[in-house]
Image: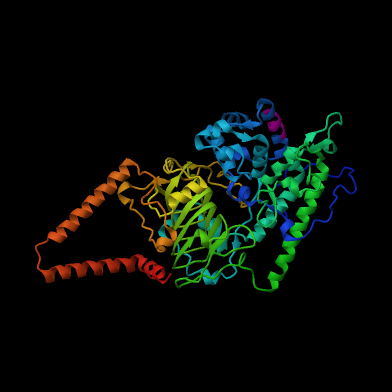
């Protein structure tokens, strides 16, 4: 698979050991296959032009040397980052926050730091340069649905708002003249592996050290075991990642090293050849798996799930061999998932329409893509949640951070510890304070590290309207245009969102109220509305009416309420949840 980025690549044609790898034929067993870590590619790309280099190695190697010479502890804070990259302090802090959310080791000081300590802790310089290098990555284009006609009736028709959409509207980016959907996990993994395969020599040059007295050039570079471990930011072994096993233990040249003795550095060329063989083996395995699908039914992890028009009580989160749980193609329905219903700590909600979806679980990552006219409650997200290419969607979540890309007419009810990031071509977005709870919410927040005392819902940070990672061509001159930011929901429009307690004692927890304090202006509005409601109830109770007239009034109120349930579509949710 070709990559659209063409930076200078270090030469690899020098004379080498004819058999640098003691295990030249990597075992094709899926347990030992190499995989790209998806998190940096899915949640770690920032559309900041000064982070995207024409020739990354020519820029990053001198930058690394400068940072190392000025940082005795091999870590860099936002002030030094801002100065060295010539970016604003806000953008430098965004780099640190984003890197922390996608690092491979939960034991890294940056990951373990509290929000107020991130700047003083700083990022490891070698992790940072790898993070900056992959900013050159180009994502796969959205794919066309295999059966566009089957989804035409569930994707919303255009509105009057479409009349003045810019040339880069979400409709044109995703749908164009056909329905487009997120690339399959298999396609994305192959694309990411191909990117790593192409750029591997450059990536290793950022981690390698020269051997003293052996001159310059590729052959004089070596990798210590400690530097090799930094590759865990981009790659992992096994179906579920390294599971706490150091990456070096998968490498024949470091495996079984004496823990009491420093491992002997390995020539970078030997590491390069070994990794290329593993990547080639993984790509071949992907190709072999894909071949039968061309002549047979697709697997659950890659197929376009048919849209359901009825209550999907039989629809389950779709598991794949590895990676996140999928909830795909829900239409005109309601769906509830708890932690026990999900196979892992990451979830992707794809192409759901006119529905209500509850994901009441502690998660590390969440993605919402291509949904419309849907309310989605996402429990507690400890790393990052991304909402992309959605229309008229309400998202309610407690999360460490959120990124919103190419959405329109959406509302976000947030309990977030970091500034909401808004990128791409967005229109008519609204943000509001978090407005719900369920019995296990605080337990889930504590489990993934979301703090209820910090909520930056009303401090959105808007970046460029063009995403340089999306492989699309864009009109000249728009790359520097800032994305449209979000406006605050008016206080009198905020209402509490009630999550029914379907499971009773099965999911008992200690949360009895919204753990995020409401801002004073919103709290005052709610109290005023509660007072008005109480007064109306009192007037109705004390109305000087005969019993039969009271019954007629009560009946009329029920009729109007039932009419509202049908007109709003909420009656379907009641029936579906009752069926569950």
Q: Nearer the viewer, residue 280 or 245?
A: 245
Q: Nearer the viewer, residue 462 or 129?
A: 129
Whether residue 158 sits left or right of residue 196 in the image: it is left
Occupied quadrant, residue 46? top right
Of the 4 image quadrants, the one containing the C terminus is bottom left
Read off the magenta span.
61-66
Residue at point 24% right, 48% down? Answer: 528
Q: Nearer the viewer, residue 454 or 215?
A: 454
Q: Position of residue 84 (x, y in %)?
A: 63, 30
Residue at point 54% right, 71% down? Answer: 306
- Identify the colour scheme used: rainbow
Residue at point 82% right, 48% down? Answer: 273
Whether residue 373 sits left or right of residue 81 in the image: it is left
Q: Where is residue 543 in the image (x, y as percent from the top left)?
A: 12, 61
For residue 125, above or below residue 242: above
Of the 4 image quadrants, the one containing the N terminus is bottom right
Residue at point 32% right, 47% down? Answer: 491
Q: Where is residue 369 in the image (x, y as percent from the top left)?
A: 53, 57
Q: Visible in this render: residue 168?
A: no
């Amino acid at each position: 698979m070709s990559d659209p980025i063409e930076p200078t690549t270090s030469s690899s044609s020098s004379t080498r050991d004819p058999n640098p790898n003691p295990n030249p034929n990597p075992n094709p067993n899926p347990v030992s296959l190499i995989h790209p870590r998806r998190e940096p590619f899915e949640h770690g790309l920032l559309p900041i032009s000064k982070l995207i280099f024409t020739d990354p190695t020519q820029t990053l190697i001198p930058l690394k040397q400068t940072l190392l010479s000025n940082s005795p502890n091999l870590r860099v804070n936002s002030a030094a980052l801002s100065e060295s990259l010539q970016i604003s302090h806000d953008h430098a802090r965004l780099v640190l926050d984003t890197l922390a959310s996608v690092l491979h080791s939960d034991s890294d000081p940056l990951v373990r730091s509290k929000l107020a300590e991130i700047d003083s802790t700083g990022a490891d310089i070698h992790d940072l340069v790898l993070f900056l290098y992959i900013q050159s990555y180009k994502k796969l284009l959205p794919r066309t649905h295999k059966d566009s006609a089957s989804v035409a009736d569930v994707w919303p028709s255009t509105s009057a708002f479409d009349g003045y959409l810019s040339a880069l509207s979400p409709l044109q980016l995703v749908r164009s003249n056909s329905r487009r959907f997120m690339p399959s996990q298999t396609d994305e993994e192959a694309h990411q592996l191909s990117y790593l395969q192409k750029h591997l020599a450059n990536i290793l040059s950022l981690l390698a050290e020269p051997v003293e007295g052996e001159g310059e050039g590729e052959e004089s570079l070596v990798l210590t075991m400690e530097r090799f471990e930094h590759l865990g930011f981009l790659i992992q072994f096994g179906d579920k990642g390294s599971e706490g096993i150091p990456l070096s233990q998968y490498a024949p040249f470091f495996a079984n090293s004496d823990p009491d003795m420093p491992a002997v550095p390995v020539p970078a060329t030997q590491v390069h050849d070994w990794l290329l063989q593993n990547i080639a083996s993984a790509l071949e395995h992907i190709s072999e798996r894909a071949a039968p699908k061309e002549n047979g039914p697709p697997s659950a992890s890659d197929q376009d799930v048919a849209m359901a028009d009825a209550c999907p009580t039989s629809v389950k989160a779709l598991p794949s061999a590895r990676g996140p749980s999928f909830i795909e193609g829900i239409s005109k329905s309601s769906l509830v998932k708890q932690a026990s219903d999900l196979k892992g700590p990451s979830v992707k909600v794809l192409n759901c329409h006119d529905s209500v979806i509850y994901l009441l679980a502690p998660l590390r990552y969440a993605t919402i893509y291509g949904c419309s006219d849907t309310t989605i409650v996402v429990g507690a997200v400890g790393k990052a949640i991304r909402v992309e290419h959605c229309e008229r969607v309400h998202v309610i979540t407690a999360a460490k951070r959120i990124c919103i890309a190419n959405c329109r007419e959406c509302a976000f009810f947030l309990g977030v510890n970091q500034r909401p990031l808004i990128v791409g071509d967005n229109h008519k977005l609204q943000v509001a304070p978090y407005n719900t709870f369920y019995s296990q919410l605080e337990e889930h927040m504590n489990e993934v590290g979301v703090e209820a005392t910090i909520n930056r819902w009303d401090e959105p940070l808007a970046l460029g309207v063009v995403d340089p990672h999306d492989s699309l061509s864009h009109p000249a001159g728009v790359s520097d245009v800032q994305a449209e930011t979000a406006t605050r929901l008016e206080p009198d429009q905020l209402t509490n969102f009630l999550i029914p307690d379907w499971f009773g004692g099965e999911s008992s927890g200690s949360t009895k109220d919204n753990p995020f304090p409401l801002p004073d202006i919103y709290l005052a509005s709610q109290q005023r509305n509660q007072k008005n409601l109480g007064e109306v109830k009192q007037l109705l109770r004390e109305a000087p009416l005969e019993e039969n007239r009271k019954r007629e009034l009560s009946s009329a109120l029920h009729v109007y309420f039932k009419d509202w349930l049908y007109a709003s579509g909420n009656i379907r949710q009641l029936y579906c949840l009752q069926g569950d």
